[in-house]
Image (cartoon, rainbow, N blue to C red):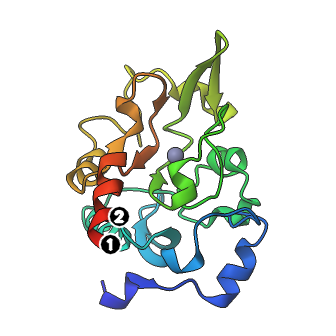
Amino acid sequence: MNEQDFTISPIPDNIFAKMQGKSYKDNCTVSRDDLRYLKVLHRGFDGRTHTGELIVNKMIAENVLDIFMKLYNEGYQIEKIRLIDEYDADDEKSMSDNNSSAFNFRYISYSTTLSKHALGLAIDINTLYNPYVKNVDGRRNVEPANAEKYTDRSVEFPHKIDHNDLCYKVFTEYGFEWGGDWEHAKDYQHFEMPDEWIEKSLCRKM
Ligand SMILES: [Zn+2]
């Protein structure tokens, strides 16, 4: 492993161009300067080393790099880490392909609240095996739609994130909150920085 295999940089022009109208929409309230482009190595489901790309908030860029370095060093398998723009910023498309990603300027499903993904402060891992399960108007909703068989978390299967999983341990060590611990919904793929942390970090900057 080389130091250059894990890098943080401002968003390059060619990447920013690709994001336009996709993850970076016209009404985006986050500036390009607040975001960083990360390159990481990860161990794929084929056991081999792959390169991944992520966009995250600059406030967590160093930590996220450390997290992916630890996961790689421990051989933790993540199938794909591609920019969501390759899926036209369509979350369902990305999740059904088991893609792991971070920044996307969007609202929480079935709400008008900005998702932490919109701030680059949330990351989804192995999304097909770790779906988002929510009851909407009495109806059970699973995202991605092809993840139904992974909603029973009492069953053992590969790539399942739970409290014993390394991914859970490493992300929470860096202060992330896990969507699998939520009461109102279960978002097993999702790690985000809590509001209290964000407020504190913003105060420190001023
Ligand atoms: Zn998420």
The nearer-to-camera label among 2 and 1 is 1
Choose top left, top right, bottom left or bottom right for residue 7. bottom left
The structure residue drawn at horizontal position 37% and vertical position 28%, both measured from the top left corner, is 156
Dot 1 beta carbon under 8 Å from ligand 1: no
Label 1 sits on a secondary structure element that is loop
User: 34 and 123: which one is in front?
Assistant: 34
- Callout 1, which amino acid? Met
Q: Residue lying furthest top in this view?
A: 138
- Examine the rendered structure and indicate whether residue 13 appears above or below residue 19: below
| Residue 94 coordinates in the image, percent (x, y) | 66, 52
Q: Which mark is residue 206?
A: 1
Residue beneath label 2, please? 202
Q: Is residue 16 above or below residue 74?
A: below
Q: Amino acid at mark 2?
A: Leu
- Of 94 and 194, nearer the camera is 194
Q: Is residue 52 rendered to the left or right of residue 47?
A: right
